[in-house]
Image (cartoon, rainbow, N blue to C red):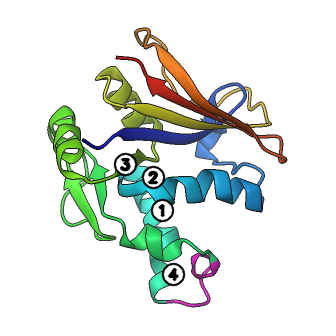
Amino acid sequence: MAKLIVSMVTSVDGYIEKPGGQFVPPPWSDEVERHWSRYALDRAEHLVYGRVNFFKMKDFWAPADTDPTSIAAGISYAKTMNRLPKTLVSRSFTGDPGWNGTLANGDLAGTIAALKANVKGDIFCFGGAGLINSLVALDLPDEYRLMVAPVLFGSGKKLFEEGRPDLPLTRTECIALGTGSVILHYRRDR
């Protein structure tokens, strides 16, 4: 059975965006690519996104297949990002999302259960926060892989909403990166 892995970047104070929805990428290096991006894409057989994040990622990565001058075309794992099957979880979007995506707008627990039963590798959820909080509320993630970036935002969009029940986790990995970021990998204790 496949595992669902939540994979997100957060500030030290737990925010994934600054006020106004501004995403601030973590400091980047070859080491970050190896332990973060390549780690996920070497294991992922399926990706799960919320609506906003899906279309941001589609707009960035999809041109790599047709425009050799696009920023994404110069990234070594662009073909993998475009090839992997994806599930777009949305209550408001209708139609074909494209980008090798399938729309799921009904039973979230049933959708994830079907993916776990049918995917032959890991399923990575790259966000957004609304989707992740819905998954956490249903206790569906099997692992959490978080990169904590060396910054305090003070406010913005929190990764985890308040009011969640306790969910015991076991740390399986901790990698301190030369950029100042730390990758924390936790397994859900069941």
Dot 1: what SS? helix
Q: Amino acid at mark 3?
A: Asp
Q: Which residue is mark 3?
A: 122
Quarter-of-image position of residue 70: bottom right
Q: Pointer 4: what residue?
A: 64
Q: Is residue 19 above or below residue 64?
A: above
User: Is 37 included in the stretch rendered in magenta?
Assistant: no
Q: Is label 1 in contact with label 2 (beta carbons under 8 Å)?
A: yes
Considering only vertical position in the picture, is 105 above or below 162?
A: below
Type of residue at label 1? Met
Which contiguous range is marked in magenta?
Answer: 67-74
- Mark 2–mark 3 Cα distance, whole angstroms, equals 19 Å
Q: CA distance from mark 1 to mark 4?
A: 12 Å
Total labels drawn: 4
Mark 4–mark 3 Cα distance, whole angstroms, equals: 24 Å
Few, some or many residues within 10 Å of mark 2 (<14, 14–19, 20+): some
Q: Nearer the viewer, mark 2 or mark 3?
A: 3
Residue that appears at 44% across and 55% down: 43
Q: Nearer the viewer, residue 58 or 47?
A: 47
